[in-house]
C-alpha cells in the first residue's frame, strides 16, 4: 500500500490510470478509456438502445403472430376480444402513461440535482407499476376462472356471452403470450427501478452522473411503448 | 463513438453535465397530458366502425403516442442522431418482416390450393368438451 502512495507522490510523468485521471482533470465518474463524460454517456445509452431494439424485435414476432391470426380468424377475434374489459385496459394505459411521465420527471430532477424530488418521483413510478400488476392480476384471475385460456386449457362455457367463430383459444393464447411477456417486463422494470432508487437514496447519483437512472428510465418507457400498441390491438379492435 | 451532433461537439471540452439536454417541466407535462388525451381518443374512436380502416386508424393514433414517448420521454429528439438511425433500421426490419409475412398470408389461396385449417379436428372446444352453446344465449357484450 505504502509503495503505491509513494509512487503517486513523486514528480515523474503520470502512467497509471489513476494518475492520468488526476493529470487530465477527469471527472471521478469517467472511465479512463473514454475521451470525456459525454462520450461515456452516449456509449452507455447506445448500448441500452441496442438492447431496447432487440426487445422491439422480440415483441415484433408476437405482433406478427397477432397479424396472421387476426386476419385468419377475423370474426372470432372480433367476438373474443369483447371478453376483455376495455375499462381495465384503459385504466392500465393511464397508469403506465403516468408512470412514464413520473420517470421522465425523475430524470429531470436528478439532472437538476434535486435528489429528493427524484426519489419521490421514482417511488411514484414503482407504485404505478404495482397498480398495473394488481389490475392485471384481477383480469387474469377472471379469465382463468371463466376458462378463457390458451389451447387445451380453454374450457369456457359461454356463461358471459357466446364467442362467435372457431378456435377462440387462439385469441387467448395470443392474449396471454403478449400481455404475459409484457407483464414480465413490468416486473423486471420494477426490479431495475427499485435498484436505481436504492442507489439514488444512497446518494450515488447527481447531475454529473446519473446514467443508471437514465437507462432504467429508457427501459421503463419501452414497457409503456409496447402497451400503447397492445391496448388497442387486444382490448379495442380484436 | 464520437459525439457527432453539434450540441455535444460544441461543449466537448466543458464540464460534463452541460452536455445533457434537460427537457423543460412544461414540455414533460404537455407530452404527458397529450398522451392521456390520445388514450381517450383511442377509446372514443374504437366505437365507430370504419371497416378495414379500424386497424389503420387505431395504429395511427398509437404511433403518434409512441412517437411522443420516444421523442420527448426517451430524449431521442435531443440525443445523438445515430440512435434515431438505429431505431429506424430496426423499425424498417420489423416492417419488412410483418408486411412480407402478410403478403404471403393474403396470397396463399391464389398460389396453393390450401387454406389454413383448424389446428386439430377436435380443437373446436364446444364439441370437444361437450359444451354446446345454447341457441338463445346472448352474444358477448363489451
Image (tube, coloured by chain):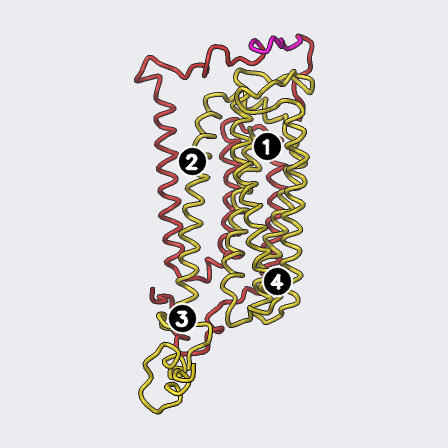
Chain colours: A yellow, B red
Element assignment for label 3: loop
The Cα atoms of the two marked residues, 1 and 2, are separated by 21 Å
Determine the chain carrying the residue at label 4. Answer: B
Q: Residue at x 50, y 55 (%)?
A: A218
Q: Quadrant of the C terminus of chain B?
A: top right
Q: Residue A94: x percent and y percent?
A: 64, 45
Q: Identify the residue position indicated by label 4 in the image.
A: B26
Element assignment for label 4: helix
Q: Residue at x 43, y 81 (%)?
A: A1
Q: Is residue B132 magenta?
A: yes
The range drawn in magenta is B127-134
Q: Residues within 10 Å of mark 2 (few under 14, many from 20)?
A: some
Q: Is residue A97 above or below residue A88?
A: below
Q: Identify the residue position indicated by label 1 in the image.
A: A236
The reply to whether callout 1 and callout 2 are in contact (CB within 8 Å) is no
The circle drawn on residue A31 is 3
Q: Are marks 2 and 4 on the same chain?
A: no
Q: Outermost residue, bottom direction?
A: A11
Determine the chain carrying the residue at label 1. Answer: A
Q: Earlier in the sequence, mark 2 or mark 3?
A: 3
Q: Quadrant of the N terminus of chain B?
A: bottom left
The circle drawn on residue A187 is none
Quarter of the view holding residue A109 = bottom right
Q: Is residue A44 above or below residue A172?
A: below
Q: Are marks 1 and 2 on the same chain?
A: yes
Amino acid at each position: 500500500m505504502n509503495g503505491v502512495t509513494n509512487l503517486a507522490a513523486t514528480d515523474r510523468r503520470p502512467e497509471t490510470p489513476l494518475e492520468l485521471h488526476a493529470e487530465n482533470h477527469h471527472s471521478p465518474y469517467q472511465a479512463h478509456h473514454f475521451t470525456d463524460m459525454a462520450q461515456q454517456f452516449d456509449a452507455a445509452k447506445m448500448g441500452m438502445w441496442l438492447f431496447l431494439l432487440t426487445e422491439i424485435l422480440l415483441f415484433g414476432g408476437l405482433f406478427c403472430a397477432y397479424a396472421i391470426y387476426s386476419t385468419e380468424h377475423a370474426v372470432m377475434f372480433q367476438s373474443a376480444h369483447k371478453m376483455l374489459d376495455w375499462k381495465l385496459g384503459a385504466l392500465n394505459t393511464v397508469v403506465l402513461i403516468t408512470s412514464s411521465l413520473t420517470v421522465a420527471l425523475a430524470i429531470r430532477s436528478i439532472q437538476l440535482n434535486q435528489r429528493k424530488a427524484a426519489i419521490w418521483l421514482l417511488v411514484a413510478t414503482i407504485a404505478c407499476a404495482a397498480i398495473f400488476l394488481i389490475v392485471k392480476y384481477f383480469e387474469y384471475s377472471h379469465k382463468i376462472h371463466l376458462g378463457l385460456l390458451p389451447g387445451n386449457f380453454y374450457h369456457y362455457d359461454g356463461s358471459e356471452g357466446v364467442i362467435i367463430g372457431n378456435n377462440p383459444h387462439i385469441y387467448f393464447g395470443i392474449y396471454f403470450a403478449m400481455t404475459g411477456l409484457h407483464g414480465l417486463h413490468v416486473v423486471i422494470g420494477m426490479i431495475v427501478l427499485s435498484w436505481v432508487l436504492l442507489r439514488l437514496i444512497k446518494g450515488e447519483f447527481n447531475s454529473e452522473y446519473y446514467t443508471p437512472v437514465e437507462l432504467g428510465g429508457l427501459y421503463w418507457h419501452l414497457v409503456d411503448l409496447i402497451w400503447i400498441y397492445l391496448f388497442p390491438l387486444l382490448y379495442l379492435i380484436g | 463513438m464520437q459525439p457527432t451532433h453539434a450540441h455535444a461537439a460544441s461543449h466537448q471540452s466543458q464540464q460534463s453535465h452541460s452536455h445533457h439536454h434537460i427537457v423543460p417541466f412544461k414540455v414533460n407535462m404537455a407530452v404527458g397530458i397529450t398522451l392521456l388525451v390520445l388514450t381517450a381518443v383511442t377509446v372514443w374512436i374504437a366505437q365507430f366502425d370504419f371497416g378495414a380502416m379500424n386497424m389503420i386508424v387505431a395504429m395511427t393514433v398509437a404511433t403518434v403516442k409512441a412517437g411522443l414517448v420516444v421523442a420527448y420521454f426517451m430524449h431521442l429528439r435531443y440525443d445523438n442522431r445515430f440512435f434515431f438511425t438505429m431505431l429506424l433500421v430496426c423499425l424498417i426490419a420489423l416492417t419488412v418482416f410483418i408486411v412480407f409475412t402478410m403478403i404471403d398470408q393474403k396470397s396463399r389461396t391464389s398460389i396453393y390450393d390450401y387454406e389454413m385449417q383448424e389446428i386439430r379436428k377436435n380443437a373446436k372446444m364446444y364439441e370437444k368438451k361437450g359444451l354446446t352453446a345454447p341457441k338463445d344465449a346472448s352474444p358477448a357484450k363489451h
